[in-house]
């Protein structure tokens, strides 16, 4: 995020950029409790929001300003919003229970679905985003062994999960049926070293 230096966020585990490219968000990973916001154009820190006692492992931002923060230690996703003009985060105190150890989050290109990689739980939590700060858990996809990260295809009809520490790493394919409706396609592709 340029030369911006966070006073309270000593390390950076994950980053996300708002849809308009104006603000970058950063988290420090478990057990860090801060979410930092940087103005990308000026490379200045806008805010360092302390979520304590919750932790901030990962971060994703939807086009409508919904910010999702993965809380690895408490198996929750915290729902925040970002002001599109100032970059200031608001924490309404919304926490969604997801699988154990949410390590990464991805938001679909249309901003209506989010997927949470639950490292310890071996699952993917499916979230439905219906408005700014309006998010609900709509399902869980089990049998995704040690999911590290998730990414959507640009057209949003598939998502891919990196599974690590198996006998061999692999990519699991998920089918996006509609907003908040995602299923396991049953396909696994090996990762070649």
Image (spheres, helix red, strand yellow):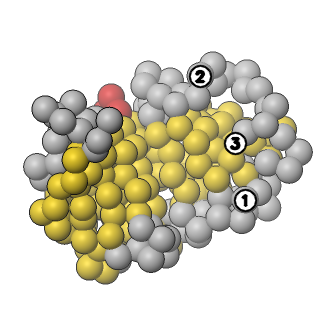
Q: Nearer the viewer, mark 2 or mark 3?
A: 2
Question: Quadrant of the image for the N terminus?
Answer: top right
**Would you name the residue on which mark 2 appears?**
11
- Of the pair 151 and 107, the residue shown nearer to us: 151
Q: Residue at x 81, y 31 (%)?
A: 3
**Would you name the residue on which mark 3 appears?**
37
Q: Which mark is residue 21?
A: 1
> Mark 3 or mark 1: which comes first in sequence?
1
Q: Position of residue 144 (x, y in %)?
A: 17, 48
Tag 2's secondary structure?
loop
Residue 172 visible to an observer of this rendering: yes
Instruction: Work out which residue is located at the far right of the displayed protein and give it.
Output: 42
Residue 55 location, quadrant: top left
Label 3, label 1: how far apart the Cα atoms are: 12 Å
**Vertical placement of 113 versus 104: above or below?**
below
- Of the pair 162 and 103, the residue shown nearer to us: 162
Tag 1's secondary structure?
loop
Q: Position of residue 172 (x, y in %)?
A: 23, 55
């Amino acid at each position: 995020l340029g030369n911006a230096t966070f006073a309270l966020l000593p390390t950076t585990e994950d980053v996300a950029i708002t849809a308009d490219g104006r603000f970058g968000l950063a988290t420090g990973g478990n057990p860090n409790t801060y979410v930092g916001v940087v103005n990308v154009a000026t490379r200045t820190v806008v805010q360092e929001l302390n979520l304590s006692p919750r932790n901030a492992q990962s971060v994703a931002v939807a086009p409508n300003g919904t910010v999702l923060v993965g809380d690895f230690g408490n198996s929750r996703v915290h729902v925040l919003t970002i002001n599109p003009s100032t970059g200031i985060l608001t924490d309404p105190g919304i926490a969604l229970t997801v699988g154990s150890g949410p390590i990464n989050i991805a938001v679909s290109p249309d901003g209506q679905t989010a997927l949470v990689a639950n490292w310890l739980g071996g699952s993917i939590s499916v979230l439905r985003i219906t408005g700014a700060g309006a998010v609900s858990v709509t399902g869980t996809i089990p049998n995704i062994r040690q999911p590290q990260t998730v990414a959507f295809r640009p057209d949003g009809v598939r998502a891919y999960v990196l599974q690590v520490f198996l006998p061999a790493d692999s990519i699991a394919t998920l089918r996006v049926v509609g907003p908040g409706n995602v299923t396991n396609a049953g396909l696994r592709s090996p990762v070649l070293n």
